[in-house]
Amino acid sequence: MCGIVGYVGRSEAAPILLDGLRRLQYRGYDSAGIAILNSGHVETRKCAGRIAALSKLMTAKPASGTSGISHTRWATHGKPTDQNAHPHFDASGKLALVHNGVIENYQTLKDQLSHDGDRKYRSQTDTEVLAHLIGKLYDEAVAGVADPDQKKSALVSAVRNALQQVIGTYGIALVHSDIANFLIGARRGSPLVLGVGKEENFLASDVSAIVAYTRDAIYLNDFDVVAVERDKFEISSLAGESGDHQVSKVEFTAEDIKKGDYPHYMLKEIFEQPDSVRDAMRGRLSAEECTAKLGGLNMTPAQLRQVGRIVLTGCGTALHAAMVGEYIIEQLAHLPVEVEYASEFRHRNTPMTSDTLVFAITQSGETADTLGALRESRRKGYRTLGICNNVASTIARESDGGVYMHAGPEIGVAATKSFTSQVTILTLIGLLLGRMRHLSTSEGSDIIEALQALPGQIEQVLELSDEIKTIAEKYAQVSGMLFFGRQCNFPIALEGALKLKEITYLFAEGHPSAELKHGIIALVRPDLPSVFIAPDDAVFSKNLNNIEQVKARKGPIIALTSGAGAKQLNAIADDIITVPNAPDFVMPVLTAIPLQLLAYHLAVALGRDVDKPRNLAKSAPTVTTFARSEGFKSLPHLVV
Ligand code: F6R
């Protein structure tokens, strides 16, 4: 939930650390700070607010040096104030630490530290307690030591010993003024990558922060501790054992994570959807066998044939994709599907049959609740697969297999292209399982044809952007919006409402259309428009009925329809958005996009900070590597 960057090399560290933070702002942006090591002391600047405020501070009071650490924060412990901004220091003021994660037992550690006398803390953060603990262990070990190499290994040992006492999650980077040009990083549960350069090395929460400087990266594993110098690094485990680490080539460039001509990442990512949906299907459709090929599931046809039940789990937008997936897989494969909030599933003892297959759906692959659900499911012995965007993420590593989205970096905090990729992949899963059961070759072939037409249809939907902007501006003064849909489009109503809430801060709710009469109709009033997702499908007339009920109570109607639906809605809806006609199982992709655009244009009209909405950060990190690969590799599982 926070972003960290570290640098050691021959260049000035400050511009590199600030540049890295700017690229990590999606992870949090309520305060920021930097610590630079210079001639035996640590210079620090930190403040509440965004990177721009820190940058201003640095201009007013520059800090020079060739190594340092930096941090952008999404507050967990303590308010977003100057004092709570990272870096935090130990008692000596010589050790500076930045942290992403939560030290759950910080109070116990704090109490233990108080046994050797009163300690003065400058913040309310859990991180400062960790800085004190490491500093204390180091100071005890180096009393009377002058040799720099001994000091380095004493610092590494202090980090290991302290982290062995920690319950919780961390990605950390630290410097100590005793030791020039030396950083230490460590991770557990929060991502950390080592960027390998020429006479310079980097640490970062994700490679987007450092890809402008190096494309050689090592994705650290949980419990790794890395000691980093200009021209070398050493990775070991918390127990002190060294292990194998592979250098990966980052497949995207700094250009790929720029906004280009778009005013916001969110708009750029909305417009990338023809490509991201195409990439989700690339090499995965077999016209010859009329099915999908998903080798990364790591399951034989016989094993897939044995699946009797599916559980789809995730959070937020990924959960909405799962809900769409429930309709699609049930329709295509006739298998019972259940959708579980990952946050509930992980703590609930859900009865499941032994033939249940679990999918954890996540853009970042790092969302704590989804990871918790995955681990609980694996602990109970269920085969658990991932649908992830982030190739090097924890969920990708810990799953039994899965399907990568290949959607490319999603920087905007509001998820857009990852949603349509998730829905597309769930359709591929429905097709694959369906063809193993009751779908004929001609039905499989029709589904493939509909999927192949999808990117072109998305392009047509994107052409509606200006029209949707006009509608959004017309409704800029409303108090909120209600969203309604049926069947596959009910989750789209939820997703439309979530997008609107997140980036406009307006009240919004999504419901199945038929629920209106069971209570929601009481909300209907002239300043609360209802958005009906009513494509020209088997339930169109039922939606029409609901629209009439709202209209009769003076509720404005924005109708999102397809094909001939517009003609019937003309007399009744205030505004109509028409997407191309398509079969039910691809329609949710086409109806989701206008709602992303509606939320986007309304947020811009209201002057909101679209890419960095209030109180939010991209739940869990993102862009590590997007190397195209057939599927998830089996990796040794981490024991936590
Ligand atoms: C909504 C949004 C969040 C995420 C959710 C899960 O726009 O971005 O609701 O969808 O936090 O995140 P991932 O998919 O990374 O697990």
Image (cartoon, rainbow, N blue to C red):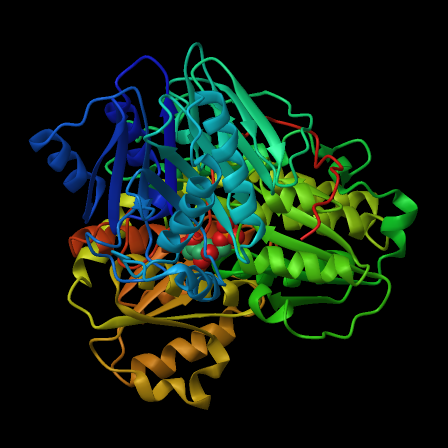
> Which x, y percent locates residue 469?
24, 50
Horizontal relation, residue 253 to residue 502: left or right: right
Measured from the top left, where is residue 24 in percent x and y? 35, 38
Total marks in image: 0
Image-based side of 450 in relation to 254, left or right: right
Task: Please indicate, yes or no, whether residue 456 appears anywhere in the rendered image.
Answer: no
Query: In terms of image quadrants, where is residue 342?
Result: bottom right
Q: Residue at x 27, y 78 (%)?
A: 555
- Residue occupying image coordinates x 76% and y 67%: 336
In the image, residue 292 lies at what x, y percent? 74, 40
Q: Position of residue 157 (x, y in %)?
A: 54, 37
Residue at the limit of the structure toward the top, as seen here: 198
Relative to 207, residue 53 above or below: below
**In the rendered view, does 473 fall on the left or right side of 617?**
left
Q: Which residue lies furthest to the right in this view?
A: 302
Name the residue located 43 percent from the left edge and 59 percent from the top edge. Answer: 113
Instruction: Say whether residue 36 is left or right of residue 406.
Output: left
- Residue at point 86%, 54% (across, down): 437
Looking at the picture, tell me which residue is in the foreground, 9 or 484.
9
* Observer-nearest of 465 and 302: 302
Q: Would you say residue 435 is visible in this rendering? A: yes
Outermost residue toward the left in this view? 60
The one of 17 and 509 positioned closer to us in this rendering? 17
